[in-house]
Amino acid sequence: MANFKILFVCILAFVHLVVGQSEVPDARPPPSERLYNSSTIENVILDVSSRIGDPTIRQIFQNCLPSTLDTTVLWTRSRSAEFPIPYTYIITGDIQGMWLRDSTYQVNPYVPYARNDSELRELILGLINTQAEMILSYPFANAYFPLEHWQAEIDLPPHSAAENDTVHPPPDLTKVFEAKFEVDSLASFLYLTKYFYEETGNTEFLDNPFWKNATELVIQTFRDLQAGTLEVLDNEPYKFTRPTRTQTETQNLYGLGNPSKTCGLIRSFFRPSDDSTIFQYLIPSNAMAVVGLRGVAQILNDVGRFPELANELSLLATQVHVAITRHGIVQHPQFGQVYAYEVDCYGSHLFMDDANFPSLLSLPKFGFVEKDDPIYLNTRQYILSPDWNPYYARGLYGGVGSPHTGLQQTWHMAVCMQGMTSLDEVEMSRMLWTVRNTTAGTGFMHESYDVNDPSEFTRDWFAWANTVLGDFILYLDKEYPHLLL
Ligand SMILES: *[C@@H]1O[C@H](CO)[C@@H](O)[C@H](O)[C@H]1NC(C)=O
Ligand SMILES: *[C@@H]1O[C@H](CO)[C@@H](O)[C@H](O)[C@H]1NC(C)=O
Ligand SMILES: *[C@@H]1O[C@H](CO)[C@@H](O)[C@H](O)[C@H]1NC(C)=O
Ligand SMILES: *[C@@H]1O[C@H](CO)[C@@H](O)[C@H](O)[C@H]1NC(C)=O
Ligand SMILES: *[C@@H]1O[C@H](CO)[C@@H](O)[C@H](O)[C@H]1NC(C)=O
């Protein structure tokens, strides 16, 4: 049987060689330069590749799926002699800091394979442990440097991005790479814990006191940021300004942001793009917080640990969920009831979507709604319409973009997300081929590209987007394999 399989793969490889060649190169670093080797992931690449008909798509998959492991896992090892828990540091790619959100998604496609592979399990447990300790050092940051005693080992940017910012409370600039408070950063930590547990059944993180303390601090921080602007005037939990000419890099009203009224939602000063919010109740990030809080409560209930913490997590999840339903769903002039991108709970709301996850588009992907939820489907109609979403790039290779990179720029991760959340096979296939045709010959995902000229792109080393492509192909292979053949 095994021989038969090998023979089949050989024949398939031969046919592909004759029939067509990839339009993009094998662009993985040579084995000796890869930062992390995983025989499990190499086997996944071989196995899934044998079921991908188009040689270009196959090559893009082979480049992108292992991109996080190949190029961004700076280390995964024991924290210290006194405290020998695994500890992992993962950079974004071309920016040498670790983002809570990016690192979570960067390992996302590997999590299911950690069940049967103890090394991958250590890698991801190590990431959860590292994130916990970073959050404890300062809960308002989006990105961090490694622990002090390991900083000397890598070529870090000489300055923290926060060095000229006025942030309250002030961060330690040797630990914090950037001090933008984004609800989804903390939600990503909870989400990674939940997803890791669901896929592996492993609960070792519960024995790490940093993990429990960090989870308590996340709850405290979310609770502090549930207070509206006027309620905590002169006693603000957080404020941020940056000297800049770019509106999206700072916050209005000397760092307070545009006023929000207390309503149960959590104020996010920045979006998952690291751009500032206009109204601070950012719905996709609050939705991800609900999923993360509820998921971690479920773990604690399953294993009967920390019942008080489990209660607090559930209570907060319910409060935020109720507030999303009450304030985050609004009437659209064309499509009926939809999720707004941002609201202020004074009644104002913003209709748009941004490519970065969590986005409105991604709500079913991380389990907040079903793909066929009627309000989600209405929402999807407006965010995928150039007439109704100002950040939808209209043109040859259209898709959702972001104010982060300007108008008429499509983001690869949003194209993949559109494919993964679709109910329509024609749309899935179109998204797959859009990605295939827009790597500008590099064989990798980019942050964004000019909607009519993909050779004009931003960020040539963006591991998060690469692993999202990996996720997309693995999803199709599992659910719609005929679309890959
Ligand atoms: C990965 O394996 C290659 C050999 O295939 C080796 O040269 C390289 O040092 C390994 N990388 C790590 C981080 O162990
Ligand atoms: C893990 O191993 C079990 C038992 O051998 C198998 O059923 C399962 O499919 C494996 N899971 C993955 C993700 O490889
Ligand atoms: C901070 O300001 C100095 C002086 O204008 C500038 O050289 C430096 O690049 C700024 N740092 C950052 C991270 O923007
Ligand atoms: C966790 O928090 C408890 C209670 O505040 C404290 O006593 C303990 O030292 C903390 N542990 C760690 C590892 O931070
Ligand atoms: C991608 O390119 C192929 C081959 O050039 C073409 O047949 C296909 O229509 C294109 N698809 C999309 C979605 O751009």
Image (cartoon, rainbow, N blue to C red):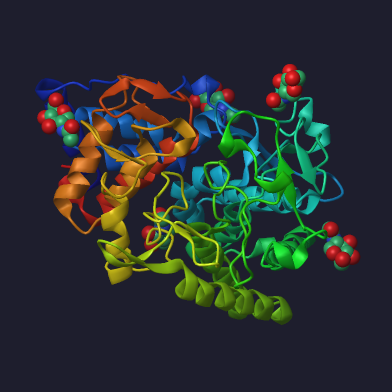
Image point (48%, 38%), residue name: 464
In this rendering, is residue 451 above or below 421? above
Asked if one can make out residue 156 in the rendered structure from this viewpoint, the answer is: no
Hey, which quadrant is residue 279 in on the image?
bottom right
Image point (26%, 46%), residue name: 387
Q: From the top left corner, tell me how far across and down residue 207 is, in percent.
A: 74, 64
Asked if one can make out residue 78 in the rendered structure from this viewpoint, the answer is: yes
Task: Give the quarter the ligand 4 occupies.
Answer: bottom right
Q: From the top left corner, tell me how far across and down residue 281 is, in percent.
A: 56, 60
Q: From the top left corner, tell me how far across and down residue 142 is, in percent.
A: 65, 44
In this rendering, is residue 56 above or below 391? above
Image point (32%, 52%), residue name: 383
Going by the image, does 374 lie left or right of 237?
left
Hey, which quadrant is residue 380 in on the image?
bottom left
The one of 113 and 162 positioned closer to us in this rendering: 162
Q: From the top left corner, tell me how far across and down residue 444 is, in percent.
A: 37, 27
